[in-house]
Image (spheres, helix red, strand yellow):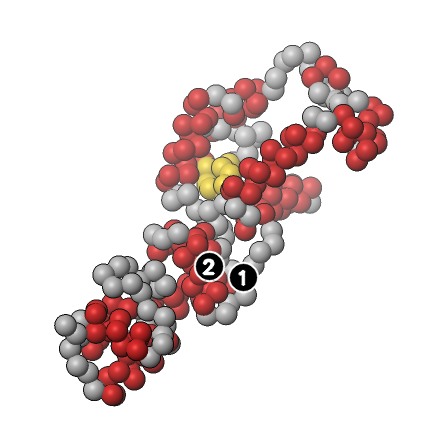
């Protein structure tokens, strides 16, 4: 049986819950049982969690919610924030929506992996259709599909040294070591999507350092492209 509480305590519980305080924080703050808090919220027509279950409406503590909002407004992705709090990206987005924070929905780093896979499968299916290529890619339809011996860069079956190394088991192991060392985060923008391994000393300048972990750093695809562009501009000066 739940304990009786006075009117001031009841108003405090309702106000705290509506302002974003987590369910179990209220229980500890007022020193009452979870059943008492749940029935108080129900009696005041406030959304409350099921008795005996986790408060799914607020999976984060209040200070974590405030930090997530601040980091998101500062430019971090929902996925990067979720990794810091060891929760799902859905939890972070639900928290941002509850506080009326406008979500960023554009750009490749905000597209889910499942949506990317569906889009890639659809484009592969369309690409294999000759009618689709004839209709949407008239230039390609005239010259034909340039692959293999038909490609202008055909080297008579000889692959480049870098292509052979990057497809080897040693390179895959090297890439896993670099990503795990950097925590699977971009070291520039802390994104966790579309990660690449960037060589600090370019491979063209030191081929023997291609598989050296100390010569590599984790960057997302966007930051990697920016870094390579800056290096090219610096070399042309």
Task: Tell me where residue 134 sits by quadrant.
Answer: top right
In-front residue for pair 174/79: 79
Name the residue tied to disc 1: 103
Looking at the image, which residue is at 26% across and 71% down? 38
Q: How crowded is mark 2: few (under 14 residues within 10 Å), some or many (20 or more)?
A: many
Looking at the image, which residue is at 42% across and 29% down? 174
Looking at the image, which residue is at 60% across and 35% down? 120
Locate residue 142 relative to residue 29 in the image: left or right: right
Q: Where is residue 65? Give x, y as percent.
A: 38, 66
Q: Residues within 10 Å of mark 1 (few under 14, many from 20)?
A: some
Name the residue tied to disc 2: 93
Residue 84 showing in the rendered view? yes
- Total residue callouts: 2
Q: Where is residue 212? Give x, y as percent.
A: 43, 30
Mark 1 or mark 2, which has the lower sequence index?
2
In-front residue for pair 125/152: 125
Q: In the picture shown, does residue 51 fall above or below 221?
A: below
Q: Name the outermost residue toward the top.
A: 156
Looking at the image, which residue is at 28% across and 68% down? 23
Residue 81 showing in the rendered view? no
Q: In the picture shown, does residue 90 fall above or below 100?
A: above
In-front residue for pair 59/168: 59
Q: Where is residue 128? Give x, y as percent.
A: 69, 26
Q: In the picture shown, does residue 10 fall above or below 163?
A: below
Quadrant of the snapshot with the N terminus: bottom left
Quadrant of the snapshot with the C terminus: top right
Q: In the picture shown, does residue 170 fall above or below 113?
A: above
In-front residue for pair 146/33: 33
Helix, strand or loop at mark 1: loop
């Amino acid at each position: 049986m739940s304990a009786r509480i006075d009117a001031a305590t009841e108003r405090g519980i309702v106000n705290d819950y509506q302002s974003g305080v987590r369910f179990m924080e209220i229980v500890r703050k007022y020193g009452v049982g979870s059943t008492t808090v749940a029935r108080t919220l129900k009696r005041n027509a406030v959304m409350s969690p099921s008795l005996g279950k986790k408060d799914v409406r607020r999976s984060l503590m209040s200070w974590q919610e405030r930090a997530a909002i601040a980091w998101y407004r500062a430019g971090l992705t929902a996925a990067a924030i979720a990794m810091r709090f060891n929760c799902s990206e859905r939890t972070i987005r639900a928290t941002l929506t509850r506080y009326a924070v406008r979500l960023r929905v554009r750009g490749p780093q905000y597209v889910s992996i499942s949506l990317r896979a569906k889009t890639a499968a659809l484009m592969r299916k369309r690409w294999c259709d000759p009618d689709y290529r004839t209709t949407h890619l008239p230039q390609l339809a005239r010259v034909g599909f340039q692959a293999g011996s038909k490609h202008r860069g055909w080297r008579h079956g000889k692959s480049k040294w870098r292509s052979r190394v990057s497809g080897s088991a040693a390179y895959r192991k090297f890439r896993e070591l670099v990503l795990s060392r950097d925590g699977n985060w971009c070291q520039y923008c802390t994104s966790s999507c579309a990660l690449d391994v960037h060589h600090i000393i370019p491979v063209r300048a030191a081929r023997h350092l291609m598989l050296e972990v100390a010569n590599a750093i984790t960057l997302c695809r966007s930051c990697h492209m920016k870094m390579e562009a800056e290096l090219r501009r610096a070399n042309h000066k």
